[in-house]
Image (cartoon, rainbow, N blue to C red):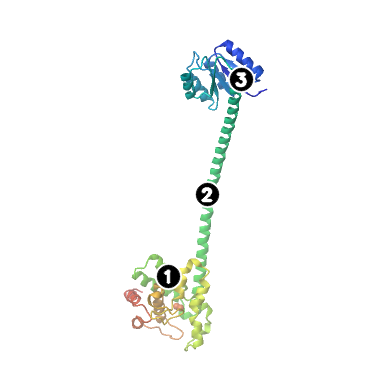
Amino acid sequence: MQENNKILFICDDNELSRYLIEKLMVDGGYFVAIEPTAKRGLATFKDNGFDLVIAKTQMPDLSPQDLIRELKAIDPDCNIIALLDEHKQEVLEYLFSLGIYDFIAKPINLEKLFFLVKKGIDMHTLMIANRRLTQGLKESNSALEKQNTLLAKRIEDSTKNLTRLYEDLRSTYMRTIKVLAQAIDARDHYTHSHSENVAKIAVAIASEMGLSAKDVETIRQACELHDLGKIGVEDCILGKTSSLTDEEWTQIRRHPQIAVQILEPLTFLNDVIELVRQHHEHYNGTGYPVGGKGEDIPLGARIIHLADAYEAMRSARSYRKIPLTKEAAVEEIKKHSGTQFDPKVVEAFLKVVDRL
Ligand SMILES: [Fe+2]
Ligand SMILES: [Fe+2]
């Protein structure tokens, strides 16, 4: 028995209807509803839903085109078997073009009819299952898309938070190091504010030379940290009033390297670190710790070196209680242009020195 399979039979030929219905219900076990007009057939189809429609397409109340179109509009998956009075090729071609599933013509071959009915119902079941599956997939896809959007938003928020945290961490590091550098300067009251003053002079020279804002900022940061390594030099050497022994000079000359070791883990300071490392290099290659020469020394380091030397001359020191006058310090710088100092840096310095 095909208890769940429902067939709608639309036909105005009562005798044929009675005969076929009896066969389909009794022999086939299908549930069959019969309607004698096309319009009543459509209403019943709409209200109940069927697995298959067998319809005489030449009905007095509706054209074959309208009947098939209306049936398909109610259920796009419905299979329609056209019931014909006679086999006419051109009529069949027309009906197939309208979307019928198959046909059966008089005289009715019951074996063929049962075969078409079973095949049509099976196909309808499959089409419905397929439609449900497709719909399910669409819904899953849309749910996944929503989840993706949500996830992307969460990742974006997390990235923003991480960036903010990184920036906070970075500025905390910078503040800590600056405080440390200032503390180093303050160990010796003669060098109090030394790094800050060197930064002012170096920034003025770098701006005069037309360096980019980014490079000027790198130079400023390097100035603030340039003598950080003096943390590793004993107080008695830093504050010594008499001349230094070779051993003491060796200790002093280690300070750029010590600063590099302290700063090296902070990779975002790489450019700054290089300037700190080379701030005691001389233009003619007699400086330390690398002994680099001319353009091999980064321009920022050549600028800091001059600013550092000028600031030292203009301040009181443990070994020289009275600072040099501006004129005397400028003369010293000029005297060592091309040997200790880069002549181009000296040239820029001379243009800005009166403003310092
Ligand atoms: Fe230094
Ligand atoms: Fe210095």
Question: Whole-Å distance between the Cαs marked 3 and 2?
Answer: 61 Å
Query: What residue is shown with label 3?
Result: 111
**What amino acid is found at the position of numbered circle 3 in the picture?**
Glu
Mark 1 crowd level (few <14, some 14–19, many ≥20, 10 Å Cα): many
Q: Earlier in the sequence, mark 2 or mark 1?
A: 2
Q: Earlier in the sequence, mark 3 or mark 2?
A: 3
State the image coordinates of residue 74 (x, y, percent, origin top left): 53, 24
- Give the quarter of the image for residue 348: bottom left
Looking at the image, residue 30 lies above or below residue 283: above
Query: What residue is shown with label 1?
Result: 220
Disc 1 is placed on an element classified as helix
Are the two marked residues, 3 and 1, in contact with CB atoms closer than 8 angstroms?
Answer: no
Numbered label attached to residue 269:
none
Q: Nearer the viewer, mark 3 or mark 1?
A: 3
Total numbered labels: 3
Considering depth in this image, is 305 or 133 the residue closer to the camera? 133
Q: Residue furthest top?
A: 15
**What amino acid is found at the position of numbered circle 1 in the picture?**
Arg
Question: Whole-Å distance between the Cαs marked 3 and 1?
Answer: 98 Å
Query: What residue is shown with label 2?
Result: 152
Disc 2 is placed on an element classified as helix
Q: Earlier in the sequence, mark 3 or mark 1?
A: 3
